[in-house]
Amino acid sequence: MSANLSEGSSLSVLNVRKDFPAPDNANIHTLALAGVTLSLAAGELVSLVGPSGCGKSTLLRLIAGLDSPNSGELWIDDVPITAPSAERGLVFQDPNLFPWLTVRRNIQAGLVARGVLHEKRHEVDEFMRLVGLEAFANALPHHLSGGMAQRVALARALVIMTPSPGRIERTIHVALDRPRQRSSPEFLRLRGEILELLHFAGNATRDRSPGVGDSSSGQNQKPPEDAKPEEPDLAPRYTESRAVRSPAPPSEPLDAQVIIIGGGPAGSSLGA
Amino acid sequence: MKTSLQETNDPARMGEEEMAGAANIGSPAAARVRVRTLLAVPVAASVALVVHLLVSKEQPETQSYSIFLCIILGSAIVAAAVQSFSSHLRRWLRHMCPIIAGAVSLSCLWEVITSGLRLLPLPYFPGPAGVLQSLIDDRASLLDSAWNSLQLLLAGYALGVAVALVTGVCIGWFNQARYWGMPLLKVVGPIPATAWIPLAMVLSPSPGLSAVGIIALAVWFPVTMLTASGISNTRASYLDVARTLGAREAYLVLRVAIPAAMPSIFIGLFMGLGAAFLTLVVAETVGVKSGLGWYVAWKQGWAEYGKVYAALVIMAAFFSTIMSLLFKVRDRVLAWQKGVIKW
């Protein structure tokens, strides 16, 4: 296990602040994150839990490099995060498949974008098999169900960073087939290779793992009053995000937004 | 409703199901409808033929119209006889018979009003027989004009689209290009392209070249506008996904923004094609000494209105063919949209 752990990358978030100008008035800013400090060792699994609108997605977007903070720093090992990188895969809550590409071409998209398709073409087939969609290789996204689309999105995010499909196979088994099984050997191996940050949809806060939550992180000075009107009972109970260091695999991971931070040798060589 | 849906989805299987359905239910109502549909064209053609013979017995040069009606009558009867062997033909007949019968009836009505009752002044409103005769007599000249129009149209349209795609993508993607290009587009674009004709004729070495330039300008505005708006409205999440997959800007533009903008680009292409038709005909009428627009103006000058209408018939066929070709291209390129958006 320790050998595996050394292959991951560690993540540091230092005193990060992020606010957004109001859409109708640039002088009014809504604070999304303030004073967020978080550090994750290689192989650690952390769940970010909190009500809608408390800044979970903002933090994930900062870690992915899609946004930059107003102040504070984000580091992967000793490299600051300044832009998106294929070493940090992000599986969005909405699958966001490119509707004009078939399933195969969607999974290939990252490889094409980085010009490595010819080297890793065989892995695309492997991934389609792993997520159980080989029969749908040439289907267009609008033919897929929501769960199938999310599996394609997972394969698309993983194919660009995997050291080898064999190792990731166990990841996908955990993610797809046995989401609630705790501390399975497969999952421990997965933790050796990949850091995951999970952001749960609102109702996941109810069944978060008890007894954890040792590291507080996000703060929300201005919780939106009308957050998630369809779940009014949740908003008053949690007004800030918590980072949950969970020994267990996340429940319903495919409904969540996932960041996969891969720092394996193959991943590093690809992310030029 | 259900059958018509299936018909569009799977024509081949629909034929079989329909046969099975007819055999099982044996509905006499359905059979009667089919017979009535099949009879529509022969009846309409016969009536038109009788009307024509009554109206024009003293005019021997209108023989070609009689032959034309006889051909319609004959092929309708043959098709009605053969339809039981081919489900494709049957479906085509069911769809087309009413509209063909309507067209034949309309031309019969036209003949009654013009040649029969002489309600309209004759040099300006010839009957269908006269128009058909003009079409046949002057076919070489008409074909030549259509060919010249096609060349002008394609050259101008291709040039306009090529330039417009580049400018549209730039304006839609780059902020600097948007800042400088958008005002130009907003000020210059709405000027009708035909208003540039006098200037173009002065500037250009040849009338043909000026017409190509004017058509290109007419196409350029709508295609640029809709390309730019399609590009700038690309869903941000598609771009986010591509960025997290390690995409660089070239990939974001060429593989994400442009495909995402395709539906909008095609609306621009259709609008541009309409503008190109209009500009082509005006340019040919005013400056260029060839083409269908020129032919119409020329024959109108000689008061040969039969040939004017013949040219209009050719124009209708010509332009609608090009339009449906563009629809075919769109259906292929935007196949991924089926079931997502309908327009």
Image: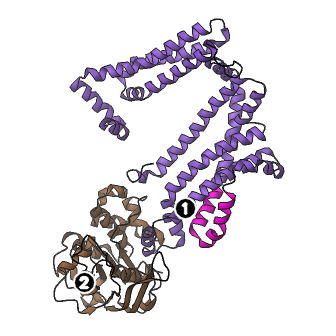
Point out the residue furthest to the top here.
B58
Give the answer, above or below, for where B127 lies relative to A88: above
The one of A86 and B220 positioned closer to us in this rendering: B220
Given the image, what chain letter belongs to the residue carrying mark 2?
A
Give the answer, above or below, for where B261 lies relative to B192: below
- Residue B22: x %, y % from top left: 26, 26
Q: In the image, is residue A165 part of the stretch drawn in magenta?
A: no
Query: A205 left or right of B79?
Result: left
Query: B82 left or right of B265?
Result: left
Secondary structure, mark 2, is loop
Q: Are marks 1 and 2 on the same chain?
A: no
Q: CA distance from mark 1 to mark 2?
A: 41 Å
User: Label 2 belongs to which residue?
Assistant: A238
Q: Quadrant of residue B58?
A: top right
Residue type indicated by callout 2? Tyr
- Residue B316: x %, y % from top left: 60, 33
The one of B191 and B47 positioned closer to us in this rendering: B191
Q: Quadrant of the N terminus of chain A?
A: bottom left
Q: Residue at x 72, y 49 (%)?
A: B214
User: Label 1 belongs to which residue?
Assistant: B229
Q: Quadrant of residue A69?
A: bottom left
The brown-coloured chain is labelled A
Classed neighbour count for the residue bearing mark 2: other residues with Cα under 10 Å, few (<14), some (14–19), many (≥20): some
Q: Residue at x 62, y 12 (%)?
A: B63
Classed neighbour count for the residue bearing mark 1: other residues with Cα under 10 Å, few (<14), some (14–19), many (≥20): some
Q: Could you tell me if residue A249 is visible in this image?
A: no
- Residue A14: x %, y % from top left: 39, 93
Residue type indicated by callout 1? Ser
Colour assigned to chain B in the rendering is purple
Nearer the observer, disc 1 or disc 2?
2
